[in-house]
Image (tube, grey):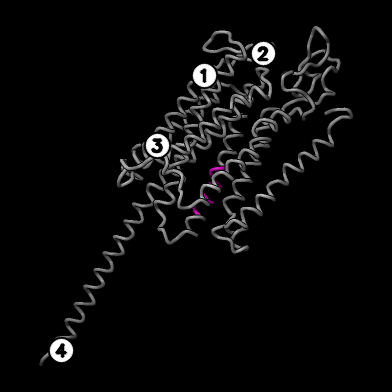
Amino acid sequence: REQHPTGKQGNKGARLAGRMAGRHGEAGMASSRRALLPFAVISCSYLLFTVTDGALRMIVLLHAYSLNFSAMDVAVMFVLYELAGVFTNLLAGVAGARWGIRATLVTGLLLQLLTYGLLYGWGWQEDLAGETRLFGHTATKQQAIVYITIVQMFGGVAKDLTKLGGKTVTKLVTPDEKNTQLFKIVSLLTGWKNSLKGVGYFLGSWLIGISYGLALGAMMALVLLALPMAYFGLDPQLGVSPSPGRLRLSDVFDRSNPNLNWLSLARLFLFASRDFWFEVPLPFFLRSPPCAAIGRPCADDSDCGSGTACDAEAGACANLNPGGGCGGLGWSRTQVGALLALYIIMYGQFQAYTPQLVTGPLRQTPPNKRTEVLWGLVNCLPTLVMAVVAGGRAPAGAP
Protein backbone atom coordinates (compact mmCIF):
# COMPACT_ATOMS: atom_id res chain seq x y z
CA ARG A 1 0.00 0.00 0.00
CA GLU A 2 1.30 3.37 -0.98
CA GLN A 3 1.57 6.17 1.64
CA HIS A 4 0.85 9.67 0.63
CA PRO A 5 4.27 11.36 0.42
CA THR A 6 2.96 14.76 1.31
CA GLY A 7 1.62 13.52 4.63
CA LYS A 8 4.99 12.20 5.76
CA GLN A 9 6.82 15.26 4.49
CA GLY A 10 4.21 17.51 6.07
CA ASN A 11 4.73 15.86 9.45
CA LYS A 12 8.49 16.22 9.10
CA GLY A 13 8.08 19.87 8.13
CA ALA A 14 5.85 20.51 11.13
CA ARG A 15 8.32 18.83 13.47
CA LEU A 16 11.19 20.81 11.94
CA ALA A 17 9.27 24.07 12.22
CA GLY A 18 8.47 23.24 15.85
CA ARG A 19 12.12 22.58 16.65
CA MET A 20 13.15 25.81 14.90
CA ALA A 21 10.51 27.78 16.76
CA GLY A 22 11.70 26.26 20.03
CA ARG A 23 15.28 27.20 19.25
CA HIS A 24 14.25 30.72 18.31
CA GLY A 25 12.26 30.95 21.53
CA GLU A 26 15.22 29.77 23.61
CA ALA A 27 17.51 32.17 21.75
CA GLY A 28 15.08 34.98 22.37
CA MET A 29 14.90 34.17 26.09
CA ALA A 30 18.70 33.97 26.28
CA SER A 31 18.95 37.28 24.48
CA SER A 32 16.47 38.85 26.92
CA ARG A 33 18.47 37.50 29.87
CA ARG A 34 21.68 38.92 28.41
CA ALA A 35 19.96 42.28 27.93
CA LEU A 36 18.53 42.32 31.46
CA LEU A 37 21.81 41.36 33.17
CA PRO A 38 23.45 44.78 32.67
CA PHE A 39 20.19 46.43 33.71
CA ALA A 40 20.16 44.45 36.96
CA VAL A 41 23.86 45.01 37.69
CA ILE A 42 23.79 48.74 36.97
CA SER A 43 20.52 49.25 38.83
CA CYS A 44 21.85 47.52 41.96
CA SER A 45 25.12 49.47 41.83
CA TYR A 46 23.30 52.73 41.14
CA LEU A 47 20.79 52.23 43.96
CA LEU A 48 23.50 51.31 46.48
CA PHE A 49 25.43 54.41 45.44
CA THR A 50 22.28 56.50 45.89
CA VAL A 51 22.08 55.54 49.58
CA THR A 52 25.62 56.84 50.09
CA ASP A 53 24.88 60.01 48.12
CA GLY A 54 21.91 60.85 50.35
CA ALA A 55 23.93 60.09 53.47
CA LEU A 56 26.79 62.29 52.27
CA ARG A 57 24.56 65.37 52.29
CA MET A 58 23.36 64.80 55.84
CA ILE A 59 26.76 63.83 57.22
CA VAL A 60 28.42 66.99 55.89
CA LEU A 61 25.53 69.28 56.84
CA LEU A 62 24.94 67.99 60.38
CA HIS A 63 28.64 67.70 61.17
CA ALA A 64 29.17 71.26 59.96
CA TYR A 65 26.27 72.41 62.14
CA SER A 66 27.82 70.76 65.20
CA LEU A 67 31.07 72.63 64.50
CA ASN A 68 29.32 76.04 64.46
CA PHE A 69 29.30 76.59 60.72
CA SER A 70 26.55 78.89 59.50
CA ALA A 71 23.97 78.11 56.83
CA MET A 72 25.91 80.23 54.33
CA ASP A 73 29.12 78.31 55.13
CA VAL A 74 27.38 75.02 54.41
CA ALA A 75 25.81 76.38 51.23
CA VAL A 76 29.29 77.28 49.97
CA MET A 77 30.45 73.75 50.74
CA PHE A 78 27.84 72.42 48.30
CA VAL A 79 28.59 74.86 45.45
CA LEU A 80 31.20 72.73 43.69
CA TYR A 81 29.15 69.59 44.36
CA GLU A 82 26.28 71.01 42.32
CA LEU A 83 28.44 72.70 39.66
CA ALA A 84 30.48 69.54 39.18
CA GLY A 85 27.22 67.73 38.53
CA VAL A 86 26.25 70.18 35.79
CA PHE A 87 29.55 69.90 33.93
CA THR A 88 29.83 66.15 34.48
CA ASN A 89 26.41 65.74 32.89
CA LEU A 90 27.73 67.49 29.79
CA LEU A 91 30.92 65.44 29.58
CA ALA A 92 29.72 62.07 30.87
CA GLY A 93 27.73 61.24 27.74
CA VAL A 94 30.82 61.66 25.56
CA ALA A 95 32.93 59.69 28.07
CA GLY A 96 30.40 56.85 28.17
CA ALA A 97 30.20 56.66 24.38
CA ARG A 98 34.02 56.51 24.12
CA TRP A 99 34.94 54.23 27.02
CA GLY A 100 31.69 52.48 27.91
CA ILE A 101 29.27 52.52 30.79
CA ARG A 102 31.40 50.19 32.92
CA ALA A 103 34.28 52.67 32.88
CA THR A 104 32.11 55.63 33.90
CA LEU A 105 30.24 53.64 36.57
CA VAL A 106 33.40 52.23 38.18
CA THR A 107 35.06 55.67 38.05
CA GLY A 108 32.03 57.18 39.79
CA LEU A 109 32.12 54.57 42.55
CA LEU A 110 35.88 55.05 43.07
CA LEU A 111 35.41 58.82 43.30
CA GLN A 112 32.72 58.29 45.93
CA LEU A 113 35.17 56.18 47.94
CA LEU A 114 37.72 58.98 47.59
CA THR A 115 35.16 61.53 48.81
CA TYR A 116 34.34 59.58 51.95
CA GLY A 117 38.01 58.81 52.57
CA LEU A 118 38.94 62.49 52.40
CA LEU A 119 36.15 63.37 54.83
CA TYR A 120 38.06 61.41 57.46
CA GLY A 121 40.54 64.27 57.33
CA TRP A 122 37.88 66.63 58.68
CA GLY A 123 38.26 66.31 62.47
CA TRP A 124 35.28 64.83 64.27
CA GLN A 125 36.03 66.15 67.75
CA GLU A 126 33.04 68.38 68.44
CA ASP A 127 33.85 71.48 70.45
CA LEU A 128 31.44 74.13 71.68
CA ALA A 129 34.04 76.77 70.87
CA GLY A 130 33.72 75.80 67.23
CA GLU A 131 37.20 74.33 66.81
CA THR A 132 37.63 72.19 63.73
CA ARG A 133 40.58 70.11 62.59
CA LEU A 134 42.03 69.00 59.29
CA PHE A 135 44.22 65.90 59.47
CA GLY A 136 44.69 66.35 63.21
CA HIS A 137 45.75 70.00 63.02
CA THR A 138 43.66 72.96 64.13
CA ALA A 139 42.25 74.78 61.12
CA THR A 140 40.29 77.96 60.57
CA LYS A 141 36.73 77.84 59.32
CA GLN A 142 37.81 79.27 55.98
CA GLN A 143 40.37 76.49 55.51
CA ALA A 144 37.79 73.87 56.40
CA ILE A 145 35.24 75.38 54.00
CA VAL A 146 37.73 75.33 51.13
CA TYR A 147 38.75 71.75 51.92
CA ILE A 148 35.20 70.39 52.20
CA THR A 149 34.10 72.27 49.09
CA ILE A 150 36.84 70.57 47.06
CA VAL A 151 36.04 67.18 48.60
CA GLN A 152 32.36 67.68 47.74
CA MET A 153 33.35 68.37 44.14
CA PHE A 154 34.56 64.76 43.84
CA GLY A 155 31.21 63.64 45.23
CA GLY A 156 29.36 65.69 42.62
CA VAL A 157 31.37 64.17 39.78
CA ALA A 158 30.83 60.68 41.24
CA LYS A 159 27.07 61.20 41.44
CA ASP A 160 26.61 62.10 37.79
CA LEU A 161 29.06 59.53 36.43
CA THR A 162 27.10 56.86 38.27
CA LYS A 163 23.77 58.34 37.23
CA LEU A 164 24.85 58.09 33.58
CA GLY A 165 24.86 54.29 33.80
CA GLY A 166 21.60 54.15 35.71
CA LYS A 167 19.73 56.26 33.17
CA THR A 168 21.44 55.01 29.98
CA VAL A 169 21.03 51.28 30.50
CA THR A 170 17.23 51.61 30.42
CA LYS A 171 17.49 52.91 26.86
CA LEU A 172 19.93 50.17 25.85
CA VAL A 173 17.62 47.36 26.97
CA THR A 174 14.37 48.88 25.64
CA PRO A 175 13.49 48.73 21.93
CA ASP A 176 13.15 52.07 20.15
CA GLU A 177 9.49 51.47 19.34
CA LYS A 178 8.57 51.05 23.02
CA ASN A 179 8.94 54.63 24.23
CA THR A 180 6.02 54.31 26.65
CA GLN A 181 7.64 51.27 28.27
CA LEU A 182 10.95 53.16 28.46
CA PHE A 183 9.23 56.08 30.19
CA LYS A 184 7.73 53.70 32.77
CA ILE A 185 11.06 51.98 33.43
CA VAL A 186 12.87 55.31 33.84
CA SER A 187 10.12 56.58 36.16
CA LEU A 188 10.32 53.42 38.27
CA LEU A 189 14.12 53.47 38.51
CA THR A 190 14.21 57.20 39.26
CA GLY A 191 11.50 56.82 41.87
CA TRP A 192 13.31 54.04 43.69
CA LYS A 193 16.54 56.01 43.39
CA ASN A 194 14.96 58.94 45.22
CA SER A 195 13.40 56.65 47.82
CA LEU A 196 16.76 55.07 48.59
CA LYS A 197 18.32 58.51 48.74
CA GLY A 198 15.79 59.13 51.53
CA VAL A 199 17.03 55.99 53.27
CA GLY A 200 20.53 57.46 52.95
CA TYR A 201 19.38 60.71 54.55
CA PHE A 202 18.07 58.81 57.55
CA LEU A 203 21.10 56.51 57.86
CA GLY A 204 23.52 59.43 57.60
CA SER A 205 21.75 61.47 60.29
CA TRP A 206 21.33 58.45 62.57
CA LEU A 207 24.88 57.13 62.24
CA ILE A 208 26.53 60.52 62.70
CA GLY A 209 24.61 60.79 65.99
CA ILE A 210 26.55 57.69 67.08
CA SER A 211 29.93 58.47 65.51
CA TYR A 212 31.21 60.54 62.60
CA GLY A 213 33.78 57.86 61.76
CA LEU A 214 31.14 55.10 61.89
CA ALA A 215 28.90 57.03 59.47
CA LEU A 216 31.74 57.40 56.96
CA GLY A 217 32.85 53.78 57.29
CA ALA A 218 29.35 52.37 56.82
CA MET A 219 28.85 54.32 53.60
CA MET A 220 32.24 53.27 52.26
CA ALA A 221 31.23 49.64 52.87
CA LEU A 222 28.14 50.11 50.66
CA VAL A 223 30.28 51.54 47.84
CA LEU A 224 32.71 48.63 48.18
CA LEU A 225 29.74 46.27 47.89
CA ALA A 226 28.72 47.85 44.57
CA LEU A 227 32.19 47.98 43.01
CA PRO A 228 32.70 44.23 42.25
CA MET A 229 29.23 44.00 40.71
CA ALA A 230 29.95 46.90 38.39
CA TYR A 231 33.42 45.75 37.37
CA PHE A 232 32.85 42.01 36.91
CA GLY A 233 29.19 42.07 35.88
CA LEU A 234 29.39 44.43 32.91
CA ASP A 235 30.83 44.12 29.42
CA PRO A 236 33.54 46.77 28.84
CA GLN A 237 32.00 47.48 25.42
CA LEU A 238 28.52 48.21 26.80
CA GLY A 239 27.44 51.63 25.57
CA VAL A 240 30.55 52.25 23.45
CA SER A 241 29.74 54.12 20.25
CA PRO A 242 30.57 52.35 16.93
CA SER A 243 32.62 55.41 15.97
CA PRO A 244 33.89 56.95 19.24
CA GLY A 245 36.62 58.94 17.49
CA ARG A 246 34.04 61.16 15.81
CA LEU A 247 32.36 62.24 19.04
CA ARG A 248 32.67 65.89 20.03
CA LEU A 249 31.45 67.89 23.00
CA SER A 250 29.22 69.90 20.67
CA ASP A 251 27.32 66.68 19.94
CA VAL A 252 25.89 66.90 23.46
CA PHE A 253 23.71 69.79 22.31
CA ASP A 254 21.22 68.20 19.93
CA ARG A 255 20.58 70.94 17.39
CA SER A 256 18.10 68.77 15.53
CA ASN A 257 15.83 68.63 18.59
CA PRO A 258 15.77 72.01 20.39
CA ASN A 259 13.02 70.75 22.71
CA LEU A 260 15.59 68.52 24.42
CA ASN A 261 17.86 71.49 25.17
CA TRP A 262 14.96 73.60 26.45
CA LEU A 263 13.85 70.73 28.69
CA SER A 264 17.36 70.34 30.07
CA LEU A 265 17.50 74.05 30.90
CA ALA A 266 14.09 73.85 32.58
CA ARG A 267 15.28 70.91 34.71
CA LEU A 268 18.26 72.97 35.84
CA PHE A 269 15.95 75.64 37.26
CA LEU A 270 13.54 73.03 38.62
CA PHE A 271 16.16 71.32 40.76
CA ALA A 272 17.74 74.64 41.74
CA SER A 273 14.36 75.87 43.02
CA ARG A 274 13.99 72.74 45.15
CA ASP A 275 17.53 72.76 46.50
CA PHE A 276 17.17 76.46 47.31
CA TRP A 277 14.97 75.64 50.31
CA PHE A 278 15.44 71.90 50.86
CA GLU A 279 19.19 71.27 50.96
CA VAL A 280 20.34 73.79 53.60
CA PRO A 281 17.61 76.17 54.90
CA LEU A 282 15.11 73.48 55.93
CA PRO A 283 17.59 71.31 57.92
CA PHE A 284 18.95 74.42 59.66
CA PHE A 285 15.41 75.55 60.51
CA LEU A 286 14.56 72.14 61.95
CA ARG A 287 17.84 71.92 63.89
CA SER A 288 18.10 75.47 65.28
CA PRO A 289 16.42 76.07 68.68
CA PRO A 290 13.49 78.41 69.34
CA CYS A 291 14.70 81.89 70.22
CA ALA A 292 12.74 81.73 73.51
CA ALA A 293 14.88 78.77 74.63
CA ILE A 294 18.09 80.84 74.54
CA GLY A 295 18.92 82.71 77.75
CA ARG A 296 16.68 80.56 79.93
CA PRO A 297 18.21 80.03 83.44
CA CYS A 298 19.78 76.64 83.90
CA ALA A 299 21.91 74.55 86.25
CA ASP A 300 22.93 71.91 83.69
CA ASP A 301 22.13 70.74 80.14
CA SER A 302 19.00 68.91 81.27
CA ASP A 303 17.36 72.29 81.92
CA CYS A 304 17.83 73.28 78.27
CA GLY A 305 16.02 72.05 75.20
CA SER A 306 17.44 70.46 72.05
CA GLY A 307 19.81 72.69 70.16
CA THR A 308 20.93 74.48 73.32
CA ALA A 309 23.35 73.74 76.18
CA CYS A 310 23.83 75.23 79.60
CA ASP A 311 26.57 77.87 79.78
CA ALA A 312 27.91 77.28 83.31
CA GLU A 313 29.49 80.74 83.57
CA ALA A 314 26.41 82.64 82.50
CA GLY A 315 23.96 80.23 84.13
CA ALA A 316 21.77 80.35 81.03
CA CYS A 317 20.99 78.17 78.01
CA ALA A 318 23.17 79.01 74.99
CA ASN A 319 22.78 78.15 71.32
CA LEU A 320 24.94 75.18 70.33
CA ASN A 321 25.54 76.84 66.98
CA PRO A 322 25.27 80.64 67.13
CA GLY A 323 25.96 80.76 63.39
CA GLY A 324 22.85 78.65 62.77
CA GLY A 325 20.57 81.30 64.23
CA CYS A 326 17.41 80.64 66.19
CA GLY A 327 13.68 80.58 65.52
CA GLY A 328 13.58 76.94 64.45
CA LEU A 329 12.15 73.80 66.01
CA GLY A 330 15.23 72.54 67.86
CA TRP A 331 14.95 68.97 66.57
CA SER A 332 17.64 66.34 67.07
CA ARG A 333 19.81 65.06 64.24
CA THR A 334 17.81 61.85 63.92
CA GLN A 335 14.49 63.71 63.83
CA VAL A 336 15.78 66.03 61.11
CA GLY A 337 17.06 63.11 59.06
CA ALA A 338 13.83 61.16 59.55
CA LEU A 339 11.64 63.99 58.27
CA LEU A 340 13.83 64.67 55.24
CA ALA A 341 14.03 60.94 54.54
CA LEU A 342 10.25 60.56 54.74
CA TYR A 343 9.76 63.45 52.34
CA ILE A 344 12.25 62.04 49.80
CA ILE A 345 10.87 58.49 50.07
CA MET A 346 7.31 59.71 49.43
CA TYR A 347 8.61 61.97 46.65
CA GLY A 348 10.35 59.01 45.07
CA GLN A 349 7.35 56.70 45.29
CA PHE A 350 5.03 59.26 43.72
CA GLN A 351 7.63 59.71 40.99
CA ALA A 352 7.83 55.95 40.42
CA TYR A 353 4.06 55.66 39.93
CA THR A 354 3.54 58.89 38.01
CA PRO A 355 2.70 57.02 34.76
CA GLN A 356 -0.09 55.10 36.52
CA LEU A 357 -1.36 57.90 38.78
CA VAL A 358 -1.01 61.01 36.64
CA THR A 359 0.16 60.83 33.06
CA GLY A 360 -1.82 57.67 32.28
CA PRO A 361 -5.24 58.97 33.35
CA LEU A 362 -4.48 62.30 31.66
CA ARG A 363 -3.42 60.41 28.52
CA GLN A 364 -0.08 62.18 28.57
CA THR A 365 2.29 59.17 28.35
CA PRO A 366 4.96 60.04 27.37
CA PRO A 367 4.32 63.54 28.76
CA ASN A 368 4.26 66.60 26.51
CA LYS A 369 4.89 70.31 27.06
CA ARG A 370 1.41 70.95 28.48
CA THR A 371 2.06 68.36 31.19
CA GLU A 372 5.42 69.98 31.98
CA VAL A 373 3.90 73.45 32.31
CA LEU A 374 0.98 72.21 34.42
CA TRP A 375 3.13 70.39 36.95
CA GLY A 376 5.75 73.11 36.90
CA LEU A 377 3.07 75.51 38.16
CA VAL A 378 1.84 72.98 40.74
CA ASN A 379 5.44 72.67 41.95
CA CYS A 380 5.37 76.33 42.97
CA LEU A 381 2.71 75.65 45.61
CA PRO A 382 4.92 74.04 48.32
CA THR A 383 7.34 76.99 48.30
CA LEU A 384 4.42 79.44 48.40
CA VAL A 385 2.84 77.62 51.36
CA MET A 386 6.16 77.59 53.25
CA ALA A 387 6.61 81.32 52.61
CA VAL A 388 3.16 82.03 54.05
CA VAL A 389 3.80 79.83 57.10
CA ALA A 390 7.25 81.35 57.69
CA GLY A 391 5.78 84.85 57.39
CA GLY A 392 3.12 83.97 59.95
CA ARG A 393 5.73 82.65 62.39
CA ALA A 394 7.98 85.69 62.13
CA PRO A 395 7.93 87.84 65.29
CA ALA A 396 6.71 91.39 65.07
CA GLY A 397 9.33 93.76 63.70
CA ALA A 398 11.37 90.94 62.16
CA PRO A 399 12.48 91.43 58.52
Mark 1 is surrounded, within 10 Å at the Cα level, by few (under 14), some (14 to 19) or many (20 or more) other residues, namely some
Find out whether residue 196 is within the magenta segment.
no
**Percent from the top left, x then y, of residue 295?**
84, 17
Q: Which mark is residue 130?
A: 2
**Percent from the top left, x then y, of residue 260?**
51, 50
Q: CA distance from mark 2 to mark 1?
A: 18 Å
Figure quadrant of residue 232? top left
Q: Which mark is residue 4?
A: 4
Q: Amino acid at mark 1?
A: Tyr
The first of marks 3 and 1 along the sequence is 3
Q: Residue at x 77, y 30 (%)?
A: 329
Mark 2 is surrounded, within 10 Å at the Cα level, by few (under 14), some (14 to 19) or many (20 or more) other residues, namely some
Badge 3 is on which residue?
104
Q: Amino acid at mark 3?
A: Thr
Q: Verify CB contact (< 8 Å) between mark 2 and mark 3.
A: no
For the magenta stretch, what is the residue range?
A: 185-194
Q: Quadrant of the C terminus?
A: top right
**Percent from the top left, x then y, of residue 93?**
42, 41
Figure quadrant of residue 17? bottom left
**Helix, strand or loop for disc 2:** loop
Q: Residue at x 30, y 47 (%)?
A: 242
Please tell me whether residue 224 is drawn above or below residue 185 in the rendered image: above
The first of marks 4 and 1 along the sequence is 4
The first of marks 2 and 4 along the sequence is 4
Badge 1 is on which residue?
120
Left or right of residue 373: residue 45 = left
